[in-house]
Image (cartoon, helix red, strand yellow):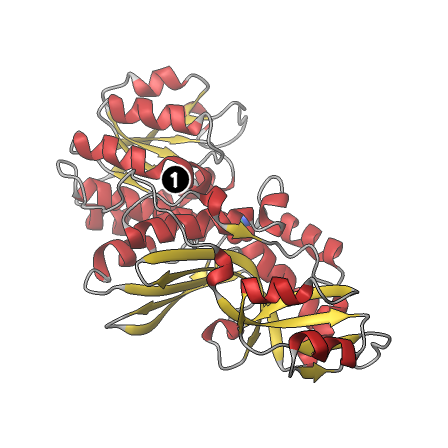
């Protein structure tokens, strides 16, 4: 029997305990032995909970218990998760986490620490919730040079954009709804400003280039400036607005961006709605592949955490190969990316054309007093230079 400790008994932590219980038989078969939760670490008590007797408040009890061979962290946030992770690995314990903030910041370091000790540090639930994407990138797509990853990596914002589009709902109402359903982060700023998606694309890009991508260097725009009017224009164009997190290989460099995009229906990500996530991957041999599924929520995320625990039990005495070194990647500036841009301005068509040349105009029912258009393909430097010469810009959204 393998004994584990779960750090944090919130949405994901309680999900991990539930998945282990509900699928005990099949999980035991696949792992090769039973997995038992010995401790649950939380600041709170849970009177009446069937597992209240497992709850401890002092991490030292877990760290110093030689029976605990796997520490599972589902608390979120960098600290104290990082301190607990290091202490677990130094005590000879494997480590699994759903925590993207921790892995985006310290993933390479924790992986190196674990590998030096023939241990594992797995983080399959940190990107895409229940969707297998970390393991495919690490173990399956090893024959390809990955040219592009474009993902809908935040369920909250995708849910919000879908609701706003389908029901004409207001931003604040759909945000409350997403929070009530347990999709949003404790502080939803991380979702709506794109910070959560930014950390996730930093993790995926790190895996693709086998080095550390600093999420602070990724240009990140959220969805807070998207209005009902933008959605009406998108509809008039047969498009949907989605928050995408993308990384591209540009020659020998990589470039990453998080921003809202207008997608048309020929794009595979167009049909990804509600809380679902999807990750589109382009390999130089594979071509296109897409990974789709539940990107947030208790049981899907817990399912990915438990899959990591099973993998750890299967690899108790050996580190699973993971090519992610602590050395840092210098990302190319996001303005090197070429895109078309949807722009709304109070300027007239003559002013628009004098700056942007030939453009396609867009009209949406009931919106007057402004000019809306889509530019030709241009890089970010050219767009910024042109936009600086045009007065009255109300909105700008990249078109994919
Ligand atoms: N807040 C995140 C989301 C949770 O909405 O996708 C999963 O990481």
Task: Indicate whether 148 appears above or below 371.
Answer: above
**Residue located beneath label 1 in the image:** 103
Look at the image and tell me whether residue 168 can be seen.
no
Residue at the left extreme, as displayed: 317
Q: At x 22% / y 56%, what residue is drawn? A: 139
Look at the image and tell me whether residue 206 can be seen.
yes
Element on which disc 1 rests: helix
Task: Indicate whether 126 appears above or below 229.
Answer: above
Task: Indicate whether 249 appears above or below 285.
Answer: above
Question: The N terminus is located in which quarter?
Answer: top left
Q: Is residue 43 left or right of residue 395?
A: left
Q: Position of residue 79 (x, y in %)?
A: 47, 27
Q: Nearer the viewer, residue 203 or 188?
A: 203
Q: At x 55% / y 52%, what residue is drawn? A: 220
Q: Nearer the viewer, residue 22 or 191?
A: 191
Residue 242, located in which quarter of the rendered image?
A: bottom right
Q: Nearer the viewer, residue 207 or 392?
A: 392
Q: Is residue 267 left or right of residue 188?
A: left
Q: At x 47% / y 62%, what residue is drawn? A: 336
Q: Position of residue 313 (x, y in %)?
A: 20, 40
Q: At x 77% / y 70%, what residue is drawn? A: 345
Q: Residues within 10 Å of mark 1 (few under 14, many from 20)?
A: many
Q: Position of residue 187 (x, y in %)?
A: 62, 40
Q: Position of residue 140 (x, y in %)?
A: 22, 61
Residue 318, located in which quarter of the rendered image?
A: top left
């Amino acid at each position: 029997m393998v004994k584990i400790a779960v750090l944090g008994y919130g949405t994901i932590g309680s999900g991990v305990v539930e998945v282990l219980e509900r699928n005990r038989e099949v999980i035991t078969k696949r792992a090769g032995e039973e997995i038992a939760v010995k401790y649950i670490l939380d600041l709170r008590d849970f009177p009446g909970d069937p597992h209240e007797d497992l709850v401890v408040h002092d991490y030292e009890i877990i760290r110093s218990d030689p029976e605990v061979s796997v520490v599972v962290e589902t608390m979120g946030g960098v600290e104290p998760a990082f301190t607990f992770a290091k202490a677990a690995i130094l005590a000879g314990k494997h480590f699994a986490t759903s925590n993207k903030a921790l892995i985006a910041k310290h993933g390479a370091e924790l992986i190196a620490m674990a590998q030096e000790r023939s241990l594992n540090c797995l983080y399959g639930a940190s990107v895409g919730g229940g969707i297998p994407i970390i393991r495919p990138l690490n173990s399956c797509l090893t024959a390809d040079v990955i040219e592009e990853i474009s993902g809908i990596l935040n369920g909250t914002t995708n849910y919000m954009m879908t609701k706003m589009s389908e029901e004409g709902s207001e931003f604040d109402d759909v945000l409350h709804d997403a929070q009530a359903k347990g999709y949003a982060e404790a502080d939803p700023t991380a979702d709506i400003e794109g910070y959560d998606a930014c950390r996730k694309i930093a993790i995926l890009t790190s895996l693709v280039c086998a080095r550390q991508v600093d999420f602070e260097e990724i240009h990140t725009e959220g969805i807070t400036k998207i209005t009902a009017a933008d959605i009406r224009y998108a509809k008039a164009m047969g498009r949907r607005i989605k928050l995408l997190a993308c990384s591209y290989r540009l020659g020998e460099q990589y470039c990453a961006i998080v921003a809202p995009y207008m997608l048309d229906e020929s794009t595979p990500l167009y049909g990804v709605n509600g809380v679902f996530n999807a990750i589109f991957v382009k390999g130089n041999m594979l071509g296109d592949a897409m990974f789709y599924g539940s990107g947030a929520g208790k049981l899907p995320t817990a399912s990915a955490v438990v899959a990591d625990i099973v993998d750890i039990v299967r690899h108790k005495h050996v580190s699973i190969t993971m090519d992610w070194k602590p050395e840092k990647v210098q990302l190319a500036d996001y303005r090197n990316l070429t895109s078309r841009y949807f722009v709304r301005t109070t300027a007239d068509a003559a002013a628009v054309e004098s700056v942007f040349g030939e453009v396609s105009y867009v009209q949406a029912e009931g919106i007057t007093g402004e000019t809306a258009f889509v530019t030709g393909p241009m890089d970010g430097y050219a767009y910024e230079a042109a936009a600086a010469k045009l007065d009255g810009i109300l909105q700008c959204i990249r078109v994919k």
